[in-house]
Amino acid sequence: MDGKNELLEQIRAVDFALIDLNLYLDTHPSCENALKDFRVLAETRERLYKQFVEKYGPLMAVNGATEDCWLWINNPWPWDTMKWEELKGGMANVGLRQENRVSDKY
Amino acid sequence: MEKLQLTTVYTGNSCSGEAIIIPVMPIDPEYATAYIRYQTYGKTYSPAEGLKQGTIFPELVDYWVN
C-alpha cells in the first residue's frame, strides 16, 4: 500500500510540474530549455502512469477496459481509503454522511 | 538604475518565426500603466518540491504570503 501511495504522489508531482511548464511554454513557446524539461517530464509521466496502471489498476476510465472486465469500478473510491475524521474536514461537501456508510455498519 | 535585462523571443514558436530581443521590462514605461516582467527560464524545483511550493519556479514563490 505504501508503494502505491508513493507512486501516486510522484504522479501528482510530475503532473503538476507539467501543468506549470505548460503555462510557461504558452507564453514562452521558443524557450528551448523549458521545452527540453517538458519533454523529459512527459516521458517520466508516461512511465509512471504505465507503472501504476500495470500494478494497481486504471488511473483514468480510458484505461479501465484493458482486460475482459470493466476495471474502473474495482478501485477504492477516495473516501473508501479515508477515515471518517478525515472526511469530515476537507471533503464534507461530497455529501457522504456517516450514517449512510455501509462499511461502518457491516 | 538596474542593469538592463534582455531576453530573446521568437515571433512564432521555436520552429517558426523570427528571433527578436526584448527587454524584460519596458525601458520607457507609461504613466498609469501596469507591467509584468517577462519571465526568463532559470532553475526549477523538482516536481515534488514544486507541488509543495505551488509552483516549479523559485522566483514565483511569494514569501509574503507563505
Image (cartoon, coloured by chain):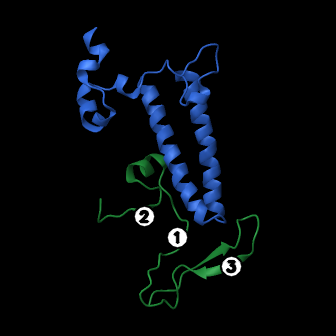
Chain to which mark 2 belongs: B
Q: Secondary structure at mark 2?
A: helix
Residue displayed at 41% across by 53% down: B54
Q: Quadrant of the N terminus of chain B?
A: bottom left
The crowd level at tag 1 (other Cα within 10 Å; few <14, some 14-19, many 20+) is some
Residue displayed at 43% across by 21% down: A76
Chain to which mark 3 belongs: B
**Residue A61, percent from left and from top:** 56, 28
User: Which callout, 2 or 1, points at the residue further toward the start of the chain?
Assistant: 1
- Left/right placement of residue A80 relative to residue A55 reads left
The crowd level at tag 3 (other Cα within 10 Å; few <14, some 14-19, many 20+) is few
Q: What hue represents chain B?
A: green
Cβ atoms under marks 2 and 1 closer than 8 Å: yes
Rounded to the nearest whole Å, what is the CA distance between mark 1 and mark 3?
15 Å
Residue placed under numbered mark 3 in the picture: B20
* Above or below for B24 versus A67: below
Q: How many marks?
A: 3
**Residue A19, percent from left and from top:** 53, 51
Residue displayed at 44% across by 84% down: B33
* Above or below for B66 versus B34: above
Question: Are the residues under badges 3 and 2 in a single subunit?
Answer: yes
Residue displayed at 29% across by 66% down: B64
Cβ atoms under marks 1 and 3 closer than 8 Å: no
User: Which callout, 1 or 3, points at the residue further toward the start of the chain?
Assistant: 3
* Above or below for A30 versus A41: below
The residue positioned farthest toward the top in the image shown: A106
Label number found at residue B60? 2
Q: Amino acid at mark 1?
A: Gln
Residue placed under numbered mark 1 in the picture: B39
Q: Amino acid at mark 2?
A: Leu
